[in-house]
Amino acid sequence: MRILVAGASGYIGHQLVSRLLAFGHQVRCLYRRPEYGVKVPAGVLACRGDVLDIESLRTALCGVECAFYLVHSMAAGGKEFASRDREGARNFAIAAREAGVRRVIYLGGLGAGRISAHLESRQETGRVLRAFGPPLVEFRAGIIVGAGSASFEIIRSLAERLPFMICPRWVTTRVQPIWIEDVLRYLLAAVSAGPQLDGEIVEIGGASIESYESMLQEYSRVRGLRRKLLRVPVLTPRLSSYWLDFITDVPRCITRQLVEGLRSEVICRGKSAREFFPRIVPLAYRESLVQTLSREDPGGWEEDAESNSFRKDGVISYAVETKIDSGMTHVRDFVHTLGGGRGWLYANWLWRLRGFVDRLIGGVGLRRSRLRIIPLRSGDRMDFWRVQEASESRLLLRAEMKVPGKAWLQFLFSPAWNGGTCLRMVASFEPLGLVGELYWWLLYPVHAIIFRGIIKQIKRELAHHTPAQASTLREHRC
């Protein structure tokens, strides 16, 4: 099908696009300014458009058979987000109907009765899309469990950083969290579902009903953390939002609206999801947590990061880069020779000290192989690192030393725009609790000096290192 995704740069949207492509659909993504740093996936047609500008929508929707509406204005802040949501939904619905779109699929918010302004706006958006547009399939979900989900990141931040929590009364509110992969399965299934689904409101949730208190405690158990919660009646939602602004990395305009909705029960009241999608069996909260927290890859380079240090989805990273006047293969082979007897080119005595300390506390220490074949392959050892991925564009190392969390070191290779190679070195750490946070930030100044020194030394040595000399490194004795 020809499918348009409005809101493709959002948390749900960018994951949905890759799944649609994998199913063979022709995907268009709606971006307000696609020329300004938007990462457009391969195989996707980027369309300029704004839901507040109906003329731009008519062009983007031309020839589209099915459209996803995943837009909301809460992240923009201000009290006018509800009116912007209303106007955007009306414009999109009218343009979709005029373009002959056969179905619009929308993901809104779960909740009934007395609900927050945010949830009310999400449900009103569904009513507007239904009134002015083509047949609508409206899904309603509560808390989505997945790295990057605003609600989940609040839970992660609280459980990781606070050994003792003073909680308001709303921590006992019942909720029905759902795993991000289950949400995507429902959305994808709606594309090819029969006409009996048109006009339906489908409430989706996980297999277990929780409270915010049980979600925090279950997260702590899965991570192996001990956390104490004390409920007090005087902590209002507004005071809670101020506290979350200080503790979490979620933007203030989002935490205010989310906390206001925490007093409302968000559980599925109907059985429509099981009736329409009997093959989809959502996971319970604990299983969702295990899947979400079993991270194997820290992610790559953040092009839009404001500084060398950035945090995303619970992982803190520090990155340095340089441009080298050599080919990618030459640079990659040279980087693969680091460690062992050659050392790390800068502050080798600190690397040896770290290996000695690791051995003292029961770790692997600075292991050294007698022979290393260059280039490295997945599973090879590199001192106290294990090679997790060794491709033409990336060398990803996973730490096997003892640290309060998970640590990775990666080298990213890409062609420079004016010739040569752009080499990026990214150190990433997923801290385990408050001890992990303290570990990273106490060693941050030392790490920054070491990594800057290493990448400068790599550039300096490669300036005097010819490709002919690189052939002697194919068997590098360590």
Image: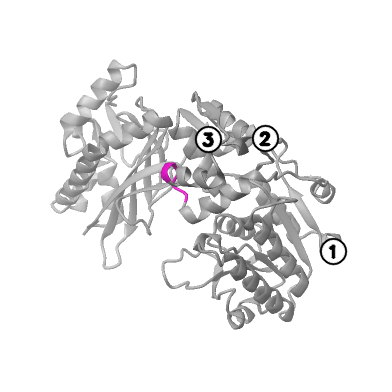
| Element type where label 2 sits in the image | strand
Q: Mark 2, residues whose alpha carbon is within 10 Å: few (<14), some, or many (≥20)?
A: many
Q: CA distance from mark 1 to mark 2?
A: 34 Å
Q: Which residues are magenta?
A: 246-250
Q: Main secondary structure of the magenta part?
A: loop
Residue under label 2: 210
The C terminus appears in which quarter of the rendering?
top left
Q: Is residue 131 above or below residue 439?
A: below
Q: Nearer the viewer, mark 3 or mark 2?
A: 2
Residue under label 3: 294
Q: Mark 1, residues whose alpha carbon is within 10 Å: few (<14), some, or many (≥20)?
A: few
> In the rendered structure, which disc, 1 or 2, sits on the residue that comes first in sequence?
1
Locate residue 4: give its quadrant. Answer: bottom right
> In the rendered structure, which disc, 1 or 3, sits on the residue that comes first in sequence?
1
Q: Is residue 301 above or below residue 416?
A: above
Residue 58, image x and y in percent? Answer: 64, 81
Residue 268, image x and y in percent? Answer: 76, 45
> In the image, is 282 to the left or to the right of 34?
right
Q: Amino acid at mark 2?
A: Glu
Residue 461, image x and y in percent? Answer: 15, 48
Total numbered labels placed on residues in the image: 3
Q: Nearer the viewer, mark 1 or mark 2?
A: 2
Q: Mark 3, residues whose alpha carbon is within 10 Å: few (<14), some, or many (≥20)?
A: few
Residue 158, image x and y in percent? Answer: 49, 37
Q: Amino acid at mark 1?
A: Pro
The N terminus appears in which quarter of the rendering?
bottom right
Q: Amino acid at mark 3?
A: Ser
Question: Which labelled disc corresponds to residue 195?
Answer: 1
